[in-house]
Image (tube, rainbow, N blue to C red):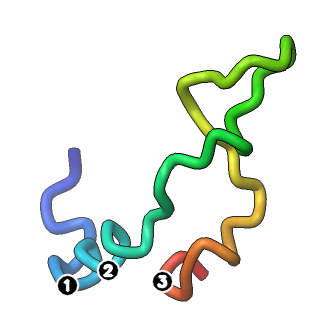
């Protein structure tokens, strides 16, 4: 943990713009929905992530 790594307002923006879990992005190799999603288009998540 790094104290004060982000300004509090910036950290709040990161949290607010973080996407909801999308099962379409969590398809495992066997075709089932896994417990984590992978979004390779990070720039499309929200402006704060650019």
Badge 3 is on which residue? 48
Q: Residue at x 55, y 87 (%)?
A: 47
| Residue for badge 1 | 9
Query: Looking at the rendered structure, which numbered label has been put on residue 34?
Result: none
Per the image, label 3 sits on a secondary structure element best described as helix
Q: Earlier in the sequence, mark 3 or mark 1?
A: 1
Identify the image quadrant of residue 14: bottom left
The residue lying toward the viewer, choosing from 31 and 44, is 31
Q: Residue at x 28, y 82 (%)?
A: 10
Contact (Cβ within 8 Å) of mark 2 with mark 1:
yes
Describe residue 30's horizontal placement relative to residue 37 as left or right: right
Q: Nearer the viewer, residue 7 or 27?
A: 27
**2 and 3 marks in contact (CB < 8 Å):** yes
- Quadrant assignment, res 46: bottom right
Tell me what residue is drawn at x 76 percent, y 55 percent.
40
Badge 3: residue crowd in 10 Å (few <14, some 14–19, many ≥20):
some
Viewport quadrant of the C terminus = bottom right
Task: Rate crowding at label 1 as few (under 14), some (14 to 19) or many (20 or more) other CA atoms within 10 Å.
Answer: few
- Label 3 vs label 1: CA separation? 11 Å
Image x and y of residue 43, in percent = 69, 76
Q: Residue at x 54, y 25 (%)?
A: 35
Q: What distance separates the C-alpha of mark 2 from that of mark 1?
A: 6 Å
Please, what secondary structure does the residue beneath circle 2 have? helix
Q: Are marks 3 and 1 in contact (CB under 8 Å)?
A: no
Q: Which residue is mark 2?
A: 13
User: For residue 38, which quarter of the picture?
Assistant: top right
């Amino acid at each position: 943990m790094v104290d004060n790594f982000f300004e509090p307002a910036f950290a709040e923006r990161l949290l607010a713009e973080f996407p909801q879990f999308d099962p379409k992005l969590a398809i495992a190799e066997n075709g089932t929905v896994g417990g984590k999603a992978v979004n390779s288009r990070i720039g499309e998540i929200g402006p704060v992530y650019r």
